[in-house]
């Protein structure tokens, strides 16, 4: 994917963002797909467009089955 314009939280305005790892498979956060990290070309602030899948298991709370808030 090529560069895109998005609002930058640090600059405060519509700025040009580029991917740090443009080639699919070259990103350590998403080895099987496109890099979710985009950088503002004006100030260098990073922005994640997607959350990379994690390896953590599902959280389980003991003694919570059947309880209602």
Image (cartoon, rainbow, N blue to C red):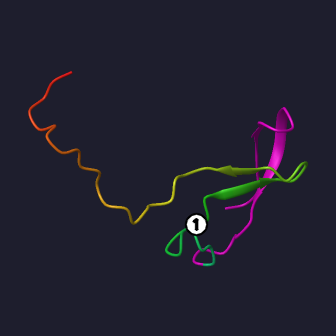
Q: Is residue 46 above or below residue 12?
A: below
**Residue matched to label 1:** 34
Q: Quadrant of the C terminus?
A: top left
In which quarter of the view is residue 7 placed?
top right
- Comparing 10 with 40, the one in front is 10
Q: Position of residue 53 (x, y in %)?
A: 44, 61
- Callout 1 crowding tier (Cα within 10 Å): few <14, some 14–19, many ≥20: some
Find the magenta span and give its range.
1-25
Say whether residue 43 is magenta: no
Asked if residue 62 is positioned above or below residue 7 in the image, the reply reads below
- For the residue pair 50 and 1, the one nearer the viewer reads as 50
Find numbered disc 1 in the image and state the secondary structure of the residue it sits on: loop
Q: Is-magenta flag for residue 3?
A: yes
Residue lying at 85% horizontally and 53% vertically, measured from the top left: 44
Reply above or below: 68 against 36. above
Q: Is residue 65 left or right of residue 28?
A: left
In-front residue for pair 59/16:
59
- Residue at image position (61%, 59%) is 36
Tell me the quarter of the picture where residue 54 sits.
bottom left
Question: Which residue occupies 28% across, 55% down?
Answer: 58
Q: Nearer the viewer, residue 15 or 63?
A: 63
The image quadrant of residue 25 is bottom right
Q: Is residue 30 left or right of residue 44?
A: left
Farthest-out residue, left = 66
User: Taking 57 as reference, is 15 left or right?
Assistant: right
Q: Residue 39, how many percent across, how many down? A: 77, 55
Furthest residue to the front? 63
Q: Residue furthest right?
A: 42
Instruction: Quadrant for the N terminus, please.
Output: bottom right
Q: Is residue 15 left or right of residue 2?
A: right
Q: Residue shown at 59%/74% (left/top)? A: 28
């Amino acid at each position: 994917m090529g560069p895109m314009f998005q609002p930058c939280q640090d600059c405060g305005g519509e700025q040009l963002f580029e991917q740090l790892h443009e080639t699919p498979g070259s990103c350590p956060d998403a080895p099987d797909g496109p890099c979710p990290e985009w950088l503002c070309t004006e100030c260098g602030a990073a922005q994640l467009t997607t959350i990379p899948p994690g390896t953590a298991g599902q959280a389980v709370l003991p003694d919570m089955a059947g309880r209602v808030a």
